[in-house]
Image: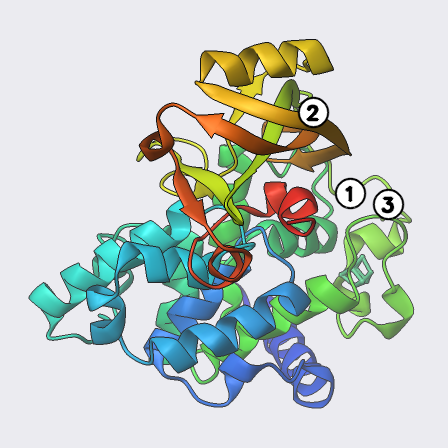
């Protein structure tokens, strides 16, 4: 049990952070009410993705799929199109599966208990805490990387915040700080503090921080050293050659596999490695395509969490194709409005 002085300090920390939030908290579209569905959609979209990127996606998603029931019934193709460009597509697939579960087991309403939320696909400890505290007023923590950074600085921890044991201890500390009257606001205040004041790279803006008086990293001049992060493995580089093949005013697409990276999305045909023009022609020949001139479209790269695609693109017009049904031929209009395609190919799809 914390002593009297610790309780007083905790209450002061809560009050200062909440006062700051009332004045400087970000005005975000999912904060207009505490609808659990809206909180859930926003929190899933915000994983690994910046707020500014998420806002238009969130608004469109809510317009097209305004309830759990709509999400449970949407086709995979429409869902992926709504998610196109946001990345980490497994998030969307998990949401649809979770929506089906919520309809079947909870009458279409998200449960409010962390333990029940954790049983839904795609909902981990952070997201469960965010939904339970913001939408249902449960005094539970919601700590992601940004919040762990603040906690490590406040408490002066110099071991890696990527370490599971460190995260567990910091979460336990945070649990003691959550006020029972405004848990959702408290968690959102920490999220906003991490996004606008206690910044990750470079110097945090301690002069604007409501928690300066509680912060060991600040008082001990350790803000450059905290948090410590575990060293990440460098991304694996994969070279690819991408073909934009047109025939009768349409372009060839193929669907990616149902499992793994960018599952079930559409892509331009391609092969591993960078090919010379002669090798491109040989590849097209092997696909039964007699091609006209082959023109380079340029180089682009796309970063995923663990790999990088470095791509060379080529455009060609079909003279004769032996097995046209091997691909799906789509118009430029269909490419932009119907077929979900990962952002990795945007450089080439913009040239169609
Ligand atoms: S005082 Fe500085 S380092 Fe400490 S929590 Fe505030 S912004 Fe972060």
> Which label sits on residue 231?
2
State how far apart marks 2 and 3 are (Cα).
Answer: 19 Å
Q: Quadrant of ligand 1?
A: bottom right
State how far apart marks 3 and 1 are (Cα).
Answer: 6 Å
- Name which quarter of the figure residue 207 lies in: bottom right
At label 3, counting other C-alpha atoms closer than 10 Å, the crowd grade (few under 14, some 14-19, many 20 or more) is some
Image coordinates of residue 86 in percent, x first then y, are 54, 55
- Circles 3 and 1: CB atoms closer than 8 Å: yes
Q: Nearer the viewer, mark 2 or mark 1?
A: 2
Image coordinates of residue 190 in percent, x first then y, are 63, 67
Q: Is mark 1 within 8 Å of ligand 1?
A: yes
The residue lying at 70 percent from left, 26 percent from top is 294
Query: Do we see residue 4 in this rendering?
Result: no
> Which label sits on residue 226?
1
**Residue furthest to the front:** 319
The residue lying at 77 percent from left, 60 percent from top is 198
**Residue 163 horizontal side relative to residue 279, left or right:** left
- Name which quarter of the figure residue 244 lies in: top right
Q: Is mark 3 within 8 Å of ligand 1?
A: no
Q: Is residue 245 above or below residue 233?
A: below
State how far apart marks 2 and 1 are (Cα).
Answer: 14 Å
Query: Do we see residue 172 in this rendering?
Result: yes
> Which label sits on residue 222?
3
Q: Is residue 10 above or below residue 123?
A: below
Q: Nearer the viewer, residue 173 or 75?
A: 75
Q: Secondary structure at mark 2?
A: loop
The residue lying at 35 percent from left, 70 percent from top is 132
Image coordinates of residue 23 in percent, x first then y, are 72, 89
């Amino acid at each position: 049990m914390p002593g009297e002085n610790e309780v007083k300090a905790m209450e002061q920390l809560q009050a200062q952070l909440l006062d700051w939030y009332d004045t400087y908290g970000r005005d975000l579209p999912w904060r207009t009410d505490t609808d659990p569905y809206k909180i859930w959609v926003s929190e899933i979209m915000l994983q690994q993705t910046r707020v500014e990127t998420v806002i238009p996606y969130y608004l469109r998603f809510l317009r097209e799929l305004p309830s759990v029931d709509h999400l449970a019934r949407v086709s995979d193709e429409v869902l992926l199109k709504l998610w196109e460009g946001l990345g980490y597509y497994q998030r969307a697939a998990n949401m649809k599966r979770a929506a089906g579960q919520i309809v079947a087991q909870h009458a279409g309403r998200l449960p409010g208990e962390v333990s029940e939320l954790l049983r839904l696909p795609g909902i981990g400890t952070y997201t469960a805490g965010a939904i339970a505290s913001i939408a249902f007023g449960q005094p539970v923590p919601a700590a992601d990387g940004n919040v762990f950074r603040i906690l490590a600085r406040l408490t002066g921890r110099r071991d890696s915040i990527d370490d599971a044991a460190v995260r567990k201890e910091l979460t336990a500390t945070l649990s003691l700080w959550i006020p029972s009257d405004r848990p959702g606001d408290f968690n959102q205040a920490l999220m906003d503090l991490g996004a606008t004041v206690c910044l990750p790279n470079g110097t945090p803006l301690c002069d604007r921080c409501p928690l300066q008086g509680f912060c060991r990293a600040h008082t001990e001049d350790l803000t450059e050293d905290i948090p410590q992060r575990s060293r990440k493995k460098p991304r694996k580089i994969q070279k690819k050659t991408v073909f934009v093949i047109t025939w009768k005013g349409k372009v060839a697409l193929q669907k990616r596999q149902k499992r793994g990276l960018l599952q079930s999305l559409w892509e331009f045909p391609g092969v591993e490695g960078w090919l010379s023009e002669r090798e491109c022609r040989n590849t097209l020949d092997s696909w039964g395509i007699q091609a006209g001139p082959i023109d380079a479209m340029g180089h682009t790269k796309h970063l995923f969490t663990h790999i990088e695609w470095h791509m060379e693109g080529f455009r060609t017009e079909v003279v004769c194709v032996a097995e046209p049904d091997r691909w799906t031929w789509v118009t430029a209009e269909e490419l932009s409005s119907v077929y979900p395609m990962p952002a990795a190919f945007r450089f080439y799809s913009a040239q169609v």
